[in-house]
Image (spheres, grey):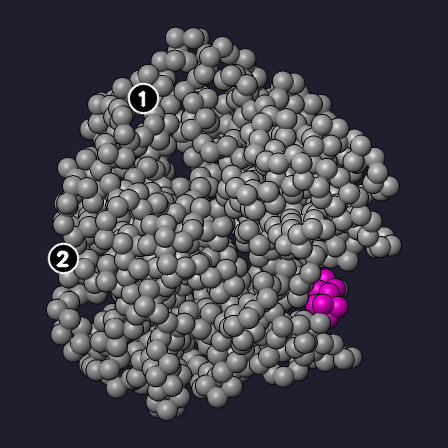
């Protein structure tokens, strides 16, 4: 078939578009789609994949006399893509007599209501939008019984994630609900495991399928520029960028922090029409940036991966990447944003700060030219199964457990899930009252509406907004920045707790904002524009992106063949010098060049470095194992680093790697799991998934084994590799990997040191507080800054730690100079008093006064009163304290028989140990006298 087989209406619109012909991918898809086959379309950006899917579908829609809305569902991972695609699809559809509508969380309510009255033939939505419709939209979902086609855009973005698994089940639910084996068409950038992706996408469909692709060898021109930075790095980078801008330019960074920081620096040079675009700025701001790009008004947009995907942003002249991207796929997506059309050349440049980044950039370029891409794995996420089981129960009111299993296990993701495993999950959800099981019938339990609540006010910490149930988009705790009832951005909660206070100025969306108030309950920050001054740039979680597992092998090859790059214009002179110096270190010292089968053991002060080219997940696993072994005593004076360039540990003297190599495999496996369970990565995953299983309170090792096991599996899937680490250690043991001890730091060792250290993360808050307080006296506010814990939570824990049964006891006194309450460790109190740092707090003004110490014992048997003169307390405190018959006192306060006012202004101290009671009586006297006479 060719385009002439299409309806005359479509041919007329093709001419109206000004197209001389269809693209190669558009020609190839006509026949299989018109024949009703499932199709996976694979092509780089700019090849017209959307029209390749839609033109034959439009043709079939025109010829279908039984067509009823909703006939075509177009699913895409980004809400921003929906707005763009709706306009793009509507250009064709409206002229053909079809109604197009969009559905996502930011669509105005008025527009959502219209679709009930004027049901669209074509609906553009996200996986979350389909989830809402099937679970909750009782009226509208009736229209899905007419579904005939489903197009899934940006498949490569979804397939290896929870959202991909969610969508897979949703398509099976749609098939079961509609009774139609509808046609499925996927659109993807270049991927490596095409057949597997097709199987995941097409699920239980009985239709034949085709994989249609075009060559991914799109021409690109790449330059690798080593930035020579002496002095202020950001200033040098900004100046370099200014000299490279070709309107319009996209500058990709690997983090939101870098995006904001670079914008701040460029702002000093008054470059017009420079914008920022990342996931933490508001949708309105994103729309304005995208419009400025499309209309050709932007000189430069500094962005993260939010602009990697197929949002239409017009003709981009050039792409700059600040530091190498994390993967070949990301590299190609970013580079492909310039020269977007098929016959155009993509032009890009990578700015590197270090020698290893030059080599890494060369490796990415080589892999891209060879068409080698990462092949991701998929995991049967049990939290997806749990949520979809609840969704199905919401949809039908109640459902037979066998039918529930049949629908979910139809998804390729969960085909290996046995019925026995499924029943154990259902039983666990029922135990947590998330589901209610009566015989074989399953319905939603009471806990569901407790966790996902419609009440947006006065929510408990564990309660979620109802809309969050439908989404697997990562929902780290964040504060919304609000100005005049509009959201202007968001910041990670941990950053707010640690760093932000009222009247602080921060920078986000490239603008300065002054904080008016922080609402801890509603997780909002009210801000107003700040006209001048400097603003702190927030640091978000997830700023460190894992590197591709293809890089270690390719980097080794680039190093071996380094001479060929010295004659190429792809790298600047500074990069060539770095490459030569990197290699010369090993040649001069008679060492083998860096590779995957050599570990260089180096030492920098008190840090041992194991420099080698290594899979990052293996490196991360080994680093966490070292950290676990080094911190059995819960010391905070140890840290590790991990990267594709090796790993390191700081703060230990003994050779822990030798201990690891000498352990047997079973022992190692257990230790690796223990080290993972102590990692903050594990607790982040556990916190993320626990509510999907209906777990509200503390997690029990005995009662919540299913939840803990799943959290471990998902943590390993994302960050670690137990299997490959055990294999790696075995290779060391068998001497398949050489260990070479060298003096000084090698270039590879320096690459390790350029990565951020990971310190022990102690889950017991009391231990963290103890470590932070050791040797000092702090206010709650100061400790909150140090620990990143809200003041309210911290004060509550400090009060608990005063009690006599606490392992790490605290007590508090009043700082007379500042009137602040300061907290100290009981074991440090006497030493802190004797240092004299708080002299006035324990030094009465008048020694001739008499007071009464009112003491209430722990058992509440009644108060006792001890009369003392201040002079006696100062000169011979034991004469006073030995009259106290208790080792522990519940409450201590003072009074003066001749002055009733004293009782009202006296400090009250609780859970006081007899060993420090003299200091607290002195503190009380000093405070009372300072208040009365000072």
Q: To which residue does mark 2 refer? A: 297
What segment is highlighted magenta in the picture?
Answer: 421-432
Q: Nearer the viewer, residue 704 or 709?
A: 704
Q: Residue at x 24, y 34 (%)?
A: 235
Q: Residue at x 66, y 63 (%)?
A: 696
Could you tell me if residue 691 is visible in this image?
A: yes
Quadrant assignment, res 674: top right
Where residue 371 appears, x then y in whole percent?
Answer: 36, 43
Q: To which residue does mark 1 refer? A: 579
Determine whether label 1 and label 2 are within 8 Å by CB.
no
Where residue 623 appears, x then y in whole percent?
Answer: 58, 32
Where residue 133 appears, x then y in whole percent?
Answer: 48, 79
Could you tell me if residue 278 is visible in this image?
A: no
The nearer-to-camera label among 1 and 2 is 2
Q: Nearer the viewer, residue 684 or 526?
A: 526
Count every numbered label the image shows and give the total: 2
Q: Residue at x 27, y 35 (%)?
A: 234
Quadrant assignment, res 101: bottom left
Q: Helix, strand, or loop for circle 1?
A: helix
Left or right: 784 as drawn, with respect to 104: right
Left or right: 474 as drawn, with respect to 30: right
Q: Is residue 39 above or below residue 924?
A: below
Q: Nearer the viewer, residue 416 or 786?
A: 786
Q: Residue at x 66, y 66 (%)?
A: 694
Where residue 895 appears, x then y in whole percent?
Answer: 70, 49
Alpha carbon separation for disc pair 1 and 2: 39 Å
Q: Quadrant of the N terminus?
A: bottom left
């Amino acid at each position: 078939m060719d385009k002439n087989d299409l309806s005359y209406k479509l041919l007329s619109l093709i001419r109206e578009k000004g197209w001389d012909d269809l693209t190669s991918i558009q020609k190839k898809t006509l026949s299989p789609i018109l024949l009703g086959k499932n199709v996976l379309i694979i092509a780089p950006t700019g090849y017209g994949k959307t029209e390749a899917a839609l033109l034959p579908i439009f043709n079939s829609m025109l010829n279908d006399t039984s067509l009823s809305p909703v006939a075509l569902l177009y699913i895409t991972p980004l809400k921003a893509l929906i707005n763009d695609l709706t306009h793009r699809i509507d250009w064709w559809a409206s002229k053909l007599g079809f109604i197009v509508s969009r559905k996502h969380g930011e669509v105005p309510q008025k527009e959502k209501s219209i679709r009930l009255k004027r049901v669209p033939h074509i609906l553009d939505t996200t996986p979350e939008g389909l989830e809402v419709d099937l679970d909750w939209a009782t009226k509208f979902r009736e229209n899905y019984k007419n579904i005939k086609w489903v197009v899934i855009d940006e498949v490569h973005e979804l397939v290896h994630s929870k959202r991909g698994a969610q969508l897979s089940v949703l398509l099976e639910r749609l098939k079961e609900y509609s009774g139609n084996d509808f046609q499925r068409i996927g659109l993807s950038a270049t991927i490596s495991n095409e057949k597997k992706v097709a199987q995941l996408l097409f699920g239980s469909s009985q239709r034949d399928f085709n994989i249609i692709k075009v060559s991914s060898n799109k021409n690109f021109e790449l330059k690798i520029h080593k930035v020579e930075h002496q002095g202020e790095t950001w200033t040098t980078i900004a100046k370099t960028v200014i000299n490279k801008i070709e309107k319009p330019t996209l500058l990709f960074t690997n983090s939101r922090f870098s995006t904001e920081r670079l914008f701040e620096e460029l702002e000093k040079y008054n470059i017009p029409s420079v914008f920022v675009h990342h996931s933490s700025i508001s949708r309105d701001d994103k729309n304005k940036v995208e419009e400025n790009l499309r209309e050709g008004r932007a000189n430069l947009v500094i962005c993260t991966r939010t602009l990697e995907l197929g949002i239409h942003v017009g003709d981009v002249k050039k792409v700059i990447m600040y530091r190498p991207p994390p993967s070949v796929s990301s590299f190609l997506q970013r580079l492909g944003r310039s020269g977007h059309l098929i016959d155009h050349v993509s032009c890009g440049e990578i700015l590197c700060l270090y020698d290893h980044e030059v080599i890494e950039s060369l490796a990415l370029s080589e892999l891209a030219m060879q068409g080698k891409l990462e092949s991701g794995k998929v995991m049967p996420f049990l939290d997806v199964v749990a949520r979809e089981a609840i969704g199905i129960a919401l949809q039908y009111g109640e459902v037979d457990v066998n039918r529930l299993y049949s629908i979910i296990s139809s998804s390729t993701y969960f085909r290996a899930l046995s019925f026995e495993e499924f029943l154990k999950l259902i039983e666990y959800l029922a135990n947590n009252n998330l589901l209610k099981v009566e015989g074989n019938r399953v319905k939603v339990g009471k806990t569901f509406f407790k966790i996902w609540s419609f009440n947006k006010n006065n929510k408990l910490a564990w309660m979620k907004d109802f809309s969050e149930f439908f989404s697997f988009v990562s929902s780290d705790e964040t504060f919304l920045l609000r100005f005049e009832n509009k959201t202007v951005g968001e910041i990670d909660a941990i950053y707010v707790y640690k760093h932000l206070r009222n009247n602080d100025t921060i920078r986000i969306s490239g603008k300065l904002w002054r904080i008016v108030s922080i609402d801890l309950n509603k997780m909002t920050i009210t801000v107003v524009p700040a006209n001048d001054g400097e603003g702190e740039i927030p640091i978000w979680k997830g700023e460190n992106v894992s590197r591709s597992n293809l890089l270690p092998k390719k980097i080794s090859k680039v190093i071996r063949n380094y001479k060929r790059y010295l004659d190429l214009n792809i790298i600047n002179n500074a990069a060539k010098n770095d490459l030569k110096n990197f290699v010369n270190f090993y040649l001069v010292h008679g060492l083998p060049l860096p590779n995957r089968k050599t570990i260089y053991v180096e030492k920098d002060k008190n840090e041992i470095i194991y420099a080698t080219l290594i899979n990052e997940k293996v490196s991360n696993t080994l680093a966490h194992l070292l950290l676990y072994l080094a911190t059995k005593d819960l010391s905070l004076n140890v840290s590790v680093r991990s990267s594709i360039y090796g790993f390191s540990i700081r703060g230990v003297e003994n050779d822990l790697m030798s201990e690891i190599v000498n352990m047997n495999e079973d022992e190692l496996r257990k230790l690796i799991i223990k080290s993972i369970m102590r990692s903050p990565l594990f607790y982040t995953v556990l916190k993320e998934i626990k509510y999907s299983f209906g777990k509200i309170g503390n997690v029990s090792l005995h009662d919540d084994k299913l939840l803990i096991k799943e959290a471990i599996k998902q943590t390993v899937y994302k960050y670690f590799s137990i299997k490959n680490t055990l294999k790696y250690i075995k290779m060391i043991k068998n001497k398949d990997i050489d260990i070479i001890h060298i003096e000084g730091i090698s270039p590879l060792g320096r690459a390790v040191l350029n990565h951020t250290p990971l310190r022990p993360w102690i889950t017991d808050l009391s231990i963290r507080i103890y470590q932070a307080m050791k040797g000092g006296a702090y206010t709650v506010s100061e400790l909150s800054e140090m620990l990143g814990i809200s003041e309210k939570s911290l004060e509550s824990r400090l009060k608990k730690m005063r009690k006599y049964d606490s392992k790490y006891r605290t007590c508090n006194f009043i700082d007379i100079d500042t009137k602040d309450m300061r907290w100290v460790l009981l074991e440090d109190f006497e030493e802190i008093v004797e240092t004299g740092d708080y002299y006035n707090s324990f030094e009465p003004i008048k020694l001739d006064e008499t007071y009464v110490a009112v003491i209430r014992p722990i058992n509440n048997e009644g108060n006792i009163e001890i009369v003392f003169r201040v002079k006696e307390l100062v000169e011979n405190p034991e004469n006073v304290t030995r009259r106290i018959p208790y080792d522990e006192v519940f409450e201590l306060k003072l009074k003066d028989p001749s002055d009733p006012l004293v009782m009202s202004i006296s400090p009250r101290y609780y859970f006081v140990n007899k060993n420090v009671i003299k200091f607290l009586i002195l503190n009380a006297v000093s405070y009372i006298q300072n208040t009365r006479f000072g």
